[in-house]
Amino acid sequence: MSLDRVASFAQFQMSTADMLRTQRDLAELTRQASSGKVADDLAGYDGKLTTLVSSRGFMQRAEAFSQLGRELGARFEIQAQSLSRIADATIGLRDTVLQVLALDDATEIPRALQNAVNDAAGALNTSFAGQFVFAGERSADAPFLARTVADITAAASVDDLFQAGTRRQVAQVDDTTRSELAPLAPEVGRDMVQAIRDLAAAAPFGRPPSPAARAALETAATALEAAHVGIVQQQGIDGARARRVEDLQRRQDDFVNLLTGTVANIEMVDMAEVATRLNAAQVQLQASASVLGTLSRLNLLEFLR
């Protein structure tokens, strides 16, 4: 073995080790450039692992609450439309009664009563995602049973026309807040249906209406006005609930955005820095390969030449 060969052996080993290390660095930098992430698994995050795992958990929970908030927002829109429908039907029937009294012609009353029942049934039996929204805990059953004026007059009492539960539906809208979602069908429609029942009992309605029918019409106008006020109050409560859920959903979105940034700061690499280091590693690898090539040719024969 040549003296040059002996002298260069240690340097050859060091250069080989340097090249292997550079190859490993190059492979890791290439992976980071491809994935954009610091590591492929949790083991690669060392001291930041606890923060990363907890941030991911909080983010998933916030995303779930945010999605629920959006779904409830859609539900509240449908509820608002239904409450508007029964409110309009109630005040519309009241207006018809007042017009009948002014014209002294009650022949329109039977048709107006049935139209009001149609609107009440459609509104009170509104469903969303397979659940009747005004049914309380009995969400699988339509809460209002009547379909015609005859159904209403045939019932033993107005209460027999409702089969809603006794508790309003609720949802957990964030970690600490539960929100009622809707009033019960009787809370919305009972007074209106009672007014329809009382007025229908005064039939027949002719032109002009009989004294008894006129008295019933006057009573119904007052009752329908009061029923409308009650429904409007329910609209206000429902709107306040919707706004509260919307506000909470926006807070969850803000929290998700904050946590997304936290997770990204831990997981994601600085692509500009990676590109710079990747280029440097490639240059270093080429230099190491050149040095190894030179050292591999150092022997006595080369020296004698």
Image (cartoon, rainbow, N blue to C red):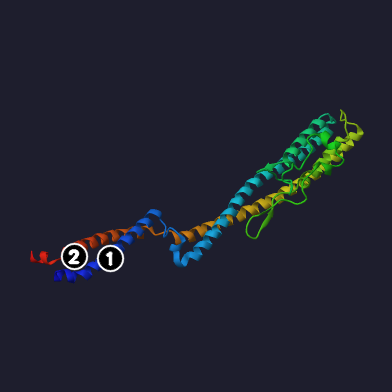
Q: Residue at x 68, y 52 (%)?
A: 241
The quadrant where residue 160 appears? top right
The quadrant where residue 174 appears? bottom right
Q: Secondary structure at mark 1?
A: helix
Q: Residue at x 63, y 59 (%)?
A: 175
Q: Are marks 2 and 1 in contact (CB under 8 Å)?
A: no
266 in relation to 66, above or below: below
Q: Crowding at label 1, few (<14), some or many (≥20) Cα neighbours within 10 Å?
A: some
Q: Secondary structure at mark 2?
A: helix
63 in relation to 107, above or below: below
Q: Is residue 81 left or right of residue 20?
A: right
Distance from the alpha carbon under mark 2 to that under mark 1: 14 Å
29 in relation to 163, above or below: below
Check disc 1 and give the amino acid type.
Asp
Q: Residue at x 64, y 52 (%)?
A: 243
N-term-proximal mark, 2 vs 1: 1
Check disc 2 and give the amino acid type.
Leu
Q: Residue 295's mark? A: 2
Image coordinates of residue 65 in percent, x first then y, are 60, 54
Q: Is residue 266 visible?
A: yes
Task: Point out the image quarter for the C terminus.
Answer: bottom left
Extreme residue in the front direction: 1
Image coordinates of residue 261 in percent, x first then y, are 48, 59
Q: Nearer the viewer, residue 206 or 182?
A: 182
Q: Is residue 45 left or right of residue 253?
A: left
Image coordinates of residue 133 in percent, x first then y, are 70, 45
The quadrant where residue 173 appears? bottom right
